Amino acid sequence: MVKTLKLLVLLLIIPISVAAQGDFIKIKTDKGYKLVIPDKVLGKDILFGSRIIDISEPSAKVYAAGQMRTPPVVIRFTKSGKILRMEQIVNFYSVVKSDPIYESIEKNQRVSAVYTFDIESKAGENSSDVSIIDVSKFFADEVSIAWPLPDNVKKGRLDPKLSSILFAKEFDDHFNVRVHYGYTGGKEPFSITVQYFMLLLPEPMKPRYDDERVGYQTISLKRYQSGRAIFSEKIISRWRIEPKPEDIAKHKKGQLVEPAKPIVVYIDPAFPSEWIPYIKLGVEDWQKAFEKIGFKNAIVAKEYPKNDPDFDPEDIKINCVRYLPVDEANAAGQIWIDPRSGEILQGDVLWWNNVISLINMWRFTQTAAVDPQARKLNFSKEMQGEMIRYAIAHETGHMLGMQHNMRSSYAYPVDSLRSPSFTKKYGTTASIMDYARNNHVAQPGDLERGVKMTPPHLGPFDYISLEYAYKIIYDAKDSEAEKVELSKIFTSKGKDPMYLFGPFTASPIVPDPASQSESLGNDIVKSSMYGIKNTQVILSNLKKWTDEVGGDRDVLANRYDALLKQYYRYLSLSLSYIGGEYEYQGPIGVFSERFVPVDKKRQLEALNFVMDELLTAGKYTLRQELFPILGATYADNVYKREADVVAAMLGNILLPRLAESSSFSSSNLTIDEYLDVVDTKLLNLDQVPNAFVKNIQIAYIQSLALAYKPKKGDEIISGFNAITAESVYKRISKTKSKINSYISNGSGDTEYFMYLMSLLKTEN
């Protein structure tokens, strides 16, 4: 049971004198800004943070107006004589008050002060009830614990003459203070306006424990219990979605009711007006999932209210889809939580200016071979809107607390992605939280048959994911009992791949081939073959299709870059099979094995596919007809991407994991077997190599030499790295002998062979 903290109530400061309004903090403006803090507020928990209101352009390249870049902190006010202290809570834990260890834990978790204020004269006030402090200087300077920018942002010196408190505004449970800061003495003039807030934290709601089969953003609470080791409980992040008291009986009977406090998301008017309906659809796509657990209108999107002077989109209680006019191609879902319980208190969808270019380019590179409409510079309102809706729905999922689920795109058979009936029902993936953009498996003619090109609005997994976080278990007396009941959601689905979860892994080659971004279908080699066919069609027609729609040189260059990236990504995706393991999330006993090595036959199939495609890719990717427009030096992009694939094949990810995999089972692919195949394929010196193949062979030899790491001084190679080094050393010896034999025989390009030999240096 999480330690209960009583409700904190604040009165907000406003720039005019006001009458007492009960037990809230209020403001006096005689000779500056002064907070009047009732004693009933002392010891209560407050969320303290800030948001960027505006910022000068040099820093706006990274940081934008509307962002809360730094997580808010939890503070308390306490009084000691004539001093008022602001204390920051940094440790959050759970312990039952009746436990013998409770008092000891409290003594070892004391909260420390970060700021102190002199309590002024209480003239005109009941001295036993309130404390008055002057906060004029406090807010006029950077408030370090709530500052929205990291320390590495170079600002110069704060100039008091260029800085001032603009206003303060109060509400029932929080207040805002807006301050403008100006700086001089830096490389460039700098200014920023910051809106600070202090928000009362409500009585903590019952936390919901995490389950690795569902994938939510989590916090960890240390749990203490006398006589037991300390352990951490993972708590998921979620909104407080509950029925109104008068609707509880209806909800228990399965009737649809509106939540007491729905999630309201406001849409920034900076978006083009024709986008607004699609943004609204993307946010409200999640309504269907909430309806499955008995709530209607649980999440709604609205435009900013017009002619409402009290509406402040920068307020901590306002959730927004925010437009950030920054030169970045990205979007994100952002949440701020109550660290005591995981309750989401505020959320935003952030839309950077150039993300529209990115999603448009995805549509072109992945579907232009199939869909003539995707070849245009300006898509139709409907096509553009569909992509915006997808992106907003994905980021709204993050705003609801969800992580990426990279396992969902592996749920569907590849051939099903060419089925009109299947794709109409399921789209490309089992979860909108995957990175499965558009249907690159579909081939020319499939669109006319009715095959869908885009992801679903929500996938099957999204419904059970939301159910896990937001379903109310009325009969559960505590979080432990809830977890037992919620586990049944997964057991009812068995091993259906539509309901499996796989986290996002930040690695160029992921350990689990079934859980990676940008892939489609349950056979990556097969789906990549389809994708490569489509990319070859687009590359062959790139100049023609760009000319037809009036594209200039920049359009052609950007499209070509994106197609090269897409082409070689298909090769890298398949490398994940090599030495890979399928991972199945969940408690022991759900699956007979948590880690299942990729079959050796599948590994070899993937390896041969990558090498065969790599050796022939140059004739498709190096477009001679583009050089008069882009310049011949543009060909270097092709050579670099070839070399990157080779480097990945011999890098510090694949080789050690092959050593690891083969150590567990003699039936798995070994490093020696792997290097034999690679060497035979890539270093075929019987044929005169063209420029592409020479580039690949040189990259192979260089990567082989780099992969060998002999002992240096007292450094000792151990573990799987030692096995890797031994195998690479043996391969280098064999490769040297192989090249030497060609040099001795005088066959082929002797100077080229000697150059390759010079690259195979393994000495320190």
Image (cartoon, rainbow, N blue to C red):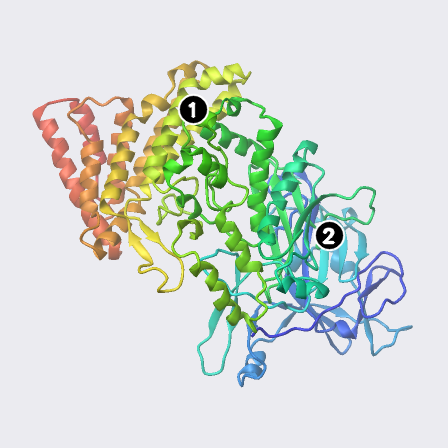
What residue is shown with label 2? 315
Pointer 2: residues within 10 angstroms few (<14), some, or many (20+)?
Answer: some
Residue 617 vs residue 191, the one in the foreground:
617
From this view, report whether residue 187 is shown above or below residue 75.
Answer: above
What residue is shown with label 1? 445
- Can residue 187 be seen from the camera position used here? no
Residue 226's spot in the image, x, y percent? 49, 82
Say what secondary structure mark 2 lies in. loop
Q: Residue at x 59, y 67 (%)?
A: 90
Q: Residue at x 44, y 47 (%)?
A: 408
Q: Quadrant of the C terminus?
A: top left
The amino acid type, in three-letter code, at marker 1 is Gly
Q: Nearer the viewer, mark 2 or mark 1?
A: 1
Q: Quadrant of the N terminus?
A: bottom right
> Spatial distance from mark 2 to mark 1, Cα to Cα?
51 Å
- Who comes first in sequence, dot 2 or dot 1? 2
Pointer 1: residues within 10 angstroms few (<14), some, or many (20+)?
Answer: few
Residue 469 vs residue 721, the one in the foreground:
469
Q: Residue furthest bottom?
A: 100
Residue 134's spot in the image, x, y percent? 80, 64
Q: Is residue 568 left or right of residue 548?
A: left
Residue 185's spot in the image, x, y percent? 67, 44
Q: Residue at x 54, y 18 (%)?
A: 551
The amino acid type, in three-letter code, at marker 2 is Asp
